[in-house]
Image (tube, rainbow, N blue to C red):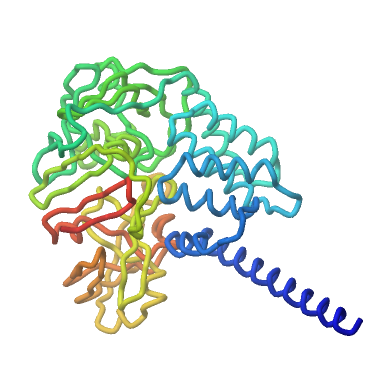
Amino acid sequence: MKRAGIFSIVLIVISQNVKGQDLNRTHNCDSLYQTKQFFEFRDSVLDWQESPSPEHRYFRGLAEAVFNQPSKAVKDLTAYLDHTSHTDSVSRLGNAFDVLGTSYFRLYQYADAAKTYREAIRRLGDEIDSSQRLDFENSARLGEILSGAPHQQIMAESTGQAHILPSKAGKYQISVKMNDEVVDSDLIFDTGANFSILDSTTAASCHVKLLDGTISVGSLTGNPTTAHVGVIDKLDIGMISLRNVVVLVFQDADLSFPSIHYHVTGAIGFPVIEALGTVTFTSDGHIEASIRQRKTSSTMRPNLALDGLNLVVEASYLNQLIPLHYDTGADATMFYPPFLRRFPSVLTNADTSTHKFSGAGGELINAKAYKLRNLQLQLDGKTISFDSVKAVTDRVNETAEFFYGNLGRDATKQFSATTLDFRTMSLRLE
């Protein structure tokens, strides 16, 4: 009896310790994901060795989506949502529905994306705030508009070689044909665009099919507006052709900046760029693409992640890993408040400055900033040096809340080439 009693006590203690470890791990994963520490989040999920529980599949699905495995994310998040309990938070459920819907869009399963967002609205109801509900409504509407559209497809003369894309040296812009019509102006090659975009004049001249219905979006000028949803039957980029490319069509005025006499014809967005497989930006201003099959096994640690459809890279400063937003359209690198909070010593020899950014309605706002001197980052085993780089003290955009900065072309042009490999989720500097 005594031995049995001691044995029971030992089992209870072990059980309590295991439960405590599970709670700590769950709390850690939640915290890392919510604060967009994606690389640490992935490591924590990979360390989860037990048989998959609904909770494990939730975290695993999020990690798979962040590191560009949408098919796996769909399986895990669907399994989680089929086995939720009353203890699951609204935040967790909202994340699961949102990432599942985005993954369906990534797979061109538009009707499934629409159903996912409608189910999220039905199940969460008034428990989500008006902003998230509006986002879900808009995403559901987009999926419904596209529900009959065929999947995007890509073709090239050879998938085993690099294709130089037709672009002007030194500019991240490319020349394209749409439905066999030459587009008069080059389009911006923009990884930060969730979909490709066009002005209405170009869409009409290139016979882009407009679907019934519009969605609410933010325009390049900073003002909220509506856009028509269209499908480009055939998009030619040099020797590479894509079929059934989704495009958002704006009124010309929504893509115009009269004060500086500038107009944007359109942009090639993330769904097209990711489909190219591996994209290389050379120091002489050219863009190359190499289409190849997705690698199913790789021991390489990814240093590239997706925040929605925005790119995040893992760099290091003073041997400490930091996440940076990466925007191929940004000329200059900039650091954000989290960087200054973590490394206050960088302000020792800094000069005060200001930074102008666009607020609501396109209004220009001045933010306090510093010019940091002689700063070095490490990325992909290489050193990036800045004689002078700006750091803002205010939250100038959504990415400035959690990320340590935005990596611009001034950083990558220090190397002969920068390669984005969407199969291994790696950024390589050469």
Instruction: Tell me: 203 left or right of 129.
Output: left
Task: Identify the residue at horizontal 20%, vertical 17% (top origin).
Answer: 180
**Which residue is situated farthest in the right direction here?**
1
Instruction: Tell me: 364 left or right of 381.
Output: right
Q: Quadrant of residue 202?
A: top left
Instruction: Tell me: 2 left or right of 329.
Output: right
Task: Identify the residue at horizontal 43%, vertical 30% (top origin).
Answer: 108
Is residue 186 positioned above or below 44 on the image? above
Residue 366 is at least partly visible in this image: no
User: How far across and how far down the image is residue 242, in percent?
Assistant: 28, 26
Is residue 203 positioned above or below 66 on the image? above
Q: Quadrant of residue 21?
A: bottom right
395, 58: nearer the viewer: 58
User: How far across and how far down the image is residue 28, in percent?
Assistant: 57, 67
170, 301: nearer the viewer: 301
Look at the image and tell me in which quarter the N terminus lies: bottom right
Is residue 104 positioned above or below 249 on the image? below
User: How far across and how far down the image is residue 357, in percent?
Assistant: 33, 55
Total tally of numbered discs in the picture: 0
Look at the image and tell me in which quarter the C terminus lies: bottom left
Q: Quadrant of residue 304?
A: bottom left
Instruction: Tell me: 283 left or right of 55.
Output: left
Task: Identify the residue at horizontal 60%, vertical 67% (top origin).
Answer: 25
User: How far across and how far down the image is residue 39, in percent?
Assistant: 42, 61
Task: Identify the residue at horizontal 63%, vertical 54% (top origin).
Answer: 55
Residue 225 is at least partly visible in this image: yes
Is residue 250 positioned above or below 106 on the image? above
55, 134: nearer the viewer: 55
